[in-house]
């Protein structure tokens, strides 16, 4: 049987529990899932690309078939570069549908052989978006339960003047390397 690789492209600024829910679901149906962070020079992100890579790597360390990467240019071209046959995207509510349909059909026009697969995150995350998380956190509201603890800590580090600006946390066991790379080292 042919191995099916999917990419899960997005901004992930910051990663939310909705993203992680989708990664978990995607990891079960694809042989390999590449979480692909868009390097977008037009946007001024809250977390820079390497901060987002660090967080997503730590948060997906438990999955043997999930890896994190970055890309620029067209999503379809990136998919070809990594040998993916599917693009995974989340649909939370009807309001997402129009934009997602437009993107999926444009991607199909560009690369007819690439399929877009939509998955729904758990209902409890259906109102959740990175944009709202940023806004709520920036205005002093709590995002507990909406983002992983690591992201919550890093949001606090970015936004709370009591914290040193730019302070960035990785959990103790992820400080220098992840579980996968430690396992790889043990094997070799
Ligand atoms: O998390 P987001 O911001 O909703 O992700 C949007 C993303 C990165 C999937 C989309 O902007 C994208 O694919 N950008 C890459 C450029 C591209 O391929 N544009 C044409 C899409 S039809």
Image (spheres, rainbow, N blue to C red):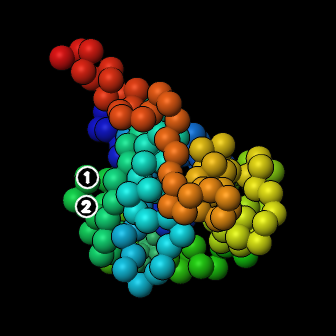
Q: Nearer the viewer, residue 78 or 185?
A: 185
**Compared with residue 170, is residue 143 higher up or lower down, i.e. above or below?**
below
Q: Residue at 34% of width from left, 60% of height from top? A: 70
In the picture provided, is 9 more to the left or to the right than 76? right
Q: Nearer the viewer, residue 152 or 115?
A: 152
Instruction: Report if the beta carbon of the residue with label 1 is closer than 8 angstroms to ligand 1.
Output: no
Tag 2 residue: 80
Answer yes or no: is residue 106 visible: no
Q: Nearer the viewer, residue 117 or 75?
A: 75
* Circle 2 Cα neighbour tier, 10 Å, few/some/many (<14 / 14–19 / ≥20): few
State the image coordinates of residue 38 (x, y, percent, origin top left): 40, 68
Tag 1 residue: 83
Answer yes or no: is residue 81 visible: yes
State the image coordinates of residue 143 (x, y, percent, origin top left): 76, 56
Q: Are marks 1 and 2 in contact (CB under 8 Å)?
A: yes
Q: How far is disc 1 from disc 2 in space, using C-alphas?
A: 5 Å
Total numbered labels placed on residues in the image? 2
Label 2 SS: helix
The quarter of the displayed image where residue 180 is located: top left
State the image coordinates of residue 156 (x, y, percent, origin top left): 66, 56
Image region (quadrant) for ligand 1: bottom left
Q: Residue at 29% of width from left, 38% of height from top? A: 2
């Amino acid at each position: 049987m042919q191995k099916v690789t999917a990419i899960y492209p997005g901004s992930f600024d910051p990663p939310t529990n909705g993203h992680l829910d989708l990664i978990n679901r995607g990891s079960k149906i694809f042989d390999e899932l590449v979480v692909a962070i868009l390097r977008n020079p037009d946007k001024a992100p809250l977390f820079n690309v390497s901060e987002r890579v660090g967080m997503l790597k730590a948060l997906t360390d438990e999955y043997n078939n999930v890896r994190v990467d970055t890309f620029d240019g067209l999503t379809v071209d990136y998919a070809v570069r990594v040998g993916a046959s599917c693009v995974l995207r989340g649909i939370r509510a009807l309001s997402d549908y129009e934009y997602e349909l437009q993107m999926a059909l444009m991607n199909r026009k560009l690369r007819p052989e690439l399929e877009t697969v939509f998955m729904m995150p758990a209902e409890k995350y259906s109102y959740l978006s990175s944009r709202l998380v940023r806004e709520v956190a920036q205005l002093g509201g709590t995002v507990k339960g909406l983002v992983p603890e690591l992201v919550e800590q890093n949001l606090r580090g970015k936004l709370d003047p009591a914290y040193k600006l730019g302070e960035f946390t990785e959990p103790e066991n992820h400080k220098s390397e992840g579980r996968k790379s430690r396992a790889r080292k043990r094997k070799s």
